[in-house]
Image: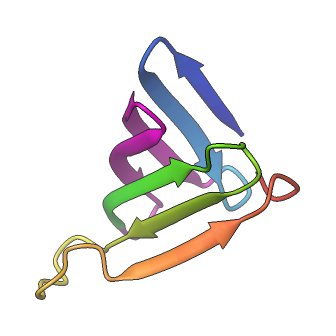
Amino acid sequence: QATFDGDQFTGTFGGNDGKLSGVLKGRTVTGTWSTPVNQGPFEFTISRTGGFIHGRYGIQGQDGPDSMPWSWTASPKIW
């Protein structure tokens, strides 16, 4: 579930154990995700048509050349 209040974004995932919090700028939301055992940054962009979202994320403490090395794409049926 996701909610926007102005440019502020909040949401849940994984049976509501996961939390999302971020800021919308244009079609992109940037923020942090958290679960009871991990957290990290995320960024996702809504397609121009609204037909899908593409995102990337990282896990805090797992340093590397890219702070958000994992990505995913979802259709509206998922979100």
In this rendered view, identify the residue nearer to me: 41 or 16. Answer: 41
The residue furthest bottom is 64
Please say whether residue 27 is one of the residues in the magenta stretch.
yes
Where is residue 39? Give x, y as percent.
34, 63
Residue at the spot 71% in from the left edge and 43% down from the top edge: 49
Where is residue 60? Give x, y as percent.
22, 70
Residue at the spot 61% in from the left edge and 55% down from the top edge: 17
Residue 5's place in the image compared with 20, above or below, is: above
- Quadrant for the N terminus, please: top right
Q: Magenta stretch?
A: 17-38
Residue at the spot 62% in from the left edge and 43% down from the top edge: 48
Where is residue 41? Give x, y as percent.
30, 59
In this rendered view, identify the residue nearer to me: 10 or 16. Answer: 10
Where is residue 14? Give x, y as percent.
68, 62
Which quarter of the picture shows residue 2?
A: top right
In this rendered view, identify the residue nearer to me: 43 or 32. Answer: 43
